[in-house]
Image (cartoon, helix red, strand yellow):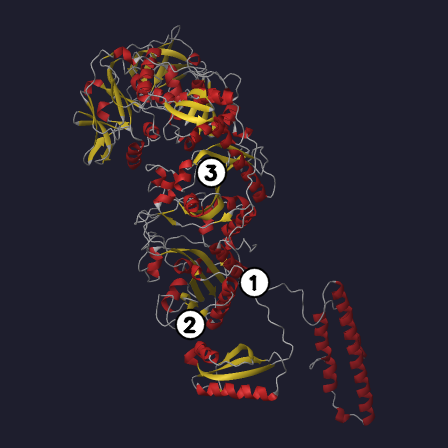
Amino acid sequence: MEEILQQLEADLAKAKTLPEVEQLRVKYLGRKGSITLLAKNTDFSRLSPDEKRSFGQRLNALKNRAEEAIQEAQQRLAQQGASLGMVWSGADLSLPSSDRRFGAMHPISLIQRELEEIFQGMGFRVLSGYEVETEYYNFDALNIPPDHPARDMQDTFWLDDGRLLRTHTSANQVRALERYGAPIRAIFPGRCFRNEAIDASHENTFYQLEGLLVDRDISVAHLIGVMKTLLSAVFHREVTVRLRPGFFPFVEPGFELDVQCLICGGNGCATCKRSGWIELIPCGLVHPRVLEFGRVDTRIFSGFAFGMGLTRMAMMKFGIPDIRLFNSGDIRFYEQFPVSM
Amino acid sequence: MKISLDWISDFVNLEGVPPEELAERLTLATAEVEQIHILRRFTQGVVVGRIIACEALHGPGEQRLHRVEVDCGSQRYQSVCGAPNVRVGLVSAFAPAGVSLAGGTLITEQTIAGCRSEGILCSAAELGMSHWHEGVLEIPNSVLLGTPLDALVPVEDVLIEIDNKSLTHRPDLWGHYGFAREISVILDRPLKPLASYDLSEFQSLPGYPLEVESFQDCPCYGCLDLRFRAGVPSPLWMQRRLHALGQRTFNLAVDVTNYVMWELGQPTHAFDGDRLRKIRVAPMGKESGFVTLDGQERRMLPDDLLIWNESEPVALAGIMGGLHSEVSLDTTHVLLESANFRADRVRRTSLRLDLRTEAAQRFEKSQPPGNVITAVGRILQCLILSGETFEALSKFTLAGDPDSYHRPLLVEWEQVDRMAGVAVPREEARRILTGLGFQVATRDGLLELGIPPHRSRRDLSIPADIVEEILRLYGYGRIEPRLPIAPLRHLPVNESLQREHRTRRVLAGAHQFIEVQNYIWFDSRWLQELSWQPQECLRLRNPPSQHNGCLRTTLVPNLLALVRPNRTHCDSFRLFEISRVFGNAEEGQHERTFLAGVTYQPSRADAEEHVRVIRSALDDLGVSLCGKGFGFEPCSEDVSPWQKRGVSLVIHGDAGPIGGIGLLTGKILKTVVPDGQVVWFELDLEAVPIVVHPAIKFAQLPVYPGSWQDFSLLWDSDRGFAALEAVLNAFRHPLVSRRDFVYRFKGKGLPPGKSSYTFRYHLAAADHTLSAEEIDAFRSEFLRHLESHGIALR
């Protein structure tokens, strides 16, 4: 009997975890444990009453001492566990969490929401438009001449009924002016379509965000000021911008707005093709003819418009190298954009 | 478009301006510079020489080789030459042994085919002038033999490459002179005039027979009948510049027309004068073939505009000449064409034929008609500069309106300042406009302008256009940014966007859904696999592929297509998409925002549970959007391969059905995925009213405890939960404050065909604790209701 106890104490000393102690308890005191079996395997009928009593006492003492030893070991290990941040209640709370409830949002949804919030913070309202548009709003009302190449089948998806898939969110400019008049401050995010061959940097389906501000005496100085403020909010830091001439029939003067490369700070790197600048936003003062199409009095009001490539912004912001991923339907892509709005 | 600084220097002094600085300033003021190329030529040590003997070598593999003797003035050389144009009398460029040529080739003395070679005759490519290597360089006879080539073709030129996209509205910038004009204003340095021959000198000569039938497509056509040595080589200064721009050289007549095109932007054409008697400008009229000078037969449509010699077509107007009227080596009689063709006409034909020539590209930008005259004067001037004489056989004959006057425009100074947002110094504005070729006068705060004819009407017609001209050269960078001041205004919420964003938050934020985006069109091959066609849809005239001609009327099929590919790397998933679908428009717009989803789990067991989990997401969505869940009713007919009777539900909003949810079974399930279980749903999001700010009403917390009562009801399994729920809904009792469904039990111990549905009722009164009698009264009333519907307790 003493041997069993000594063996138990030696085993307990070696045990490092509570489950190991539990295993030892089963080994010695369980239904088929060695101490239990010791009692079971003894043929009491062949013992004298004194022998029975003495054996019973020794067996009980052994059981008690064994239980004490096991409890001690359990307490020792539980204390160690507590000092490691675990509380013992029979369950291992350090197991990893399971069954997370978050899915994921499309990266365009994330960036669109972020930009909507920035613009709303600057007093712009958010308007929706149509994906199937008329030639009038997509081209005519934007002062795009009837023979302009953009209207070709090579560039625009045309419907059998003469309408088209909008090629830019600018199609919403005159709709917004007709409906809300001047002054107006609005953005129109949305999906656009162009008949392009698809590769890593070209898609026939992409997202833009158009902005329009019409008020009294709006100038180039205002355009620069608003864009600078906006881009500082988008990139969460002060940005340097520059305007250079760009030609779009619906603005005059028209610009390409470049932002000083945020990667190299303008020194030139691969991202900015060594130029120090990244072409970001085509913009300009709204062409008076467009304002007239929108029934705005051009003697009183002027304004500016700008177009941001939402898909392009998402690619820049999240470091997405291939535009085809946006419409790929591949969960492994979307999963990388957890809910954050 | 590349511009050569060598060429620009003819008109503006570029001294002391590094090319990088010039490129930067051009980008900021005029057009985007893409790249700066340094052109390095290998003309050092090469000399001008004449072939004085040329003997073909005969032998295997030597068919094209000639043994030549080259006279280089003070010295004669032996050489072997394989060029097709080698001939006695040809003046060319000779690189003696010891000279390095393009590609690092060091010329050495060697023996070729048994003949001694002391150097080589060079092609333009070997000299690094261009990539043309069809033959050795041809140099005019007038050049002194032995002249070092680098005296005529300098070793270096700098080319600035401009992004063509930034030149679409500027026909004047499709030639060097236009850029020289911009640069002169940018640098504030004088612009040398473009010397031009006075055409009025030929006024007394007879006109050339000319008839323009389509002034719509050809607003202005001019021609001049000339006699000169058209087939001789053009001078090296002309060749080196054309080569630098990648323009192949041919002979004096062709090169001089190309040269003036690269200088002025105006394409012209040299016909073999002996082959023409009368020019007619007219459409093709019928479908027919025409062989262009590249030897290709082109299919012409009736509307294509052609140049005719009487009734024989000789050129594709504004795009390319014909093979049979091409100038050749011996031509001495040239009809020079200088015309203006309508941009759209040229673009359509050239695009269709895929014949995007330099000429076509320029006409597509709407060349100013006035260039028709300027170009001819300049061509004659270049012939004189080439040392050639010419004789005019006709006067310069013109049909149509060359429109070459300054167009008047009045601009208020104040408007300039207002649009800029800064006061632009008057003197500077005046300098800029004058430099760009405007006639400028000022009076009483007004700018009286004459817009120069070289600027397109499309580009410059209103005061805002003038403001742009001033500001871009004044410098946008000098305008101090300002923020507009606007009155405080309430911004109305965009409800449709709000609806979309809330949907995303509920499904992605609380129910493990992943948002995807699919294309706006169906894929007909996939629809065929699904055995389904939309009844009607909006069709694309020019779809991205023949399978994608139909715009989506439902989002489900494209989502179903995503199940199989994603299953390979994901055990189970839930996808959703918010997107537009399109009905066939009867009146105006017919475009709606739909929400759809598909969910996949690998086991086919527990289908009810699968649907219930997705329904709970939709319940949450309903609460988030409009404060309450949607209604679900069994779908009583087969609507589509995915929405079938018995395995789908119709989703109801306040005004009727707005969508559906269901389980894929049978053939479509096999088509979508080989194993596992798929649930789909779709609803018309715009039909869900959004309550932006829900009116939430607080209910007093109960003061008196209530009582929970469980009931297990036996109900026909076939009739389903919804019918049972309707029965329970019909029972109203003032004490019932809540009813929960706990579980359904099917199996042993129940009467055949029955299931047991357990509900838990909570009974409470606001003003007292319920008595046992009250509870008993409720129970008996409830049981009576159940009994009247044949429902027994288990």
Residue pointed to by mark 2: B633
On the image, the x and y values in percent for residue B569 come to 49, 58
Same chain check for tags 3 and 2: no
Residue pointed to by mark 1: A101
From the viewer's side, name the closer residue of B727 and A186: A186
Graded by Cα atoms within 10 Å as few (under 14), some (14 to 19) or many (20 or more), the crowding at tag 3 reads some
On the image, the x and y values in percent for residue B260 come to 35, 20
Which residue occupies 41% across, 23% down?
B449
Q: Quadrant of residue A194?
A: top left
Q: Disc 1 sits on a residue from what chain?
A: A
Vertical relation: B475 (above or below) A32: above
Query: Which residue is the extreme one toward the left?
Result: B311
Left or right of residue A217, residue A82 in this image: right
**Marks 3 and 1, Cα distance to the nearest angstrom?**
50 Å
From the viewer's side, name the closer residue of B285 and B133: B285
Left or right of residue B389, residue B684 in this image: right
- Secondary structure beneath disc 3? strand
- Please identify, in this view, whether the residue under mark 2 or under mark 1 is nearer the observer: 2
**Marks 2 and 1, Cα distance to the nearest angstrom?**
28 Å
- Amino acid type, mark 1: Arg
Vertical relation: A144 (above or below) B149: below
On the image, the x and y values in percent for residue A291 come to 42, 39
Q: Disc 3 sits on a residue from what chain?
A: A
- Amino acid type, mark 2: Glu
Residue pointed to by mark 3: A301
Left or right of residue A93, residue A273 in this image: left
- Secondary structure beneath disc 2? strand
Which residue occupies 51% across, 51% down?
A107
- Amino acid type, mark 3: Phe
Same chain check for tags 2 and 1: no
Vertical relation: A51 (above or below) B75: below
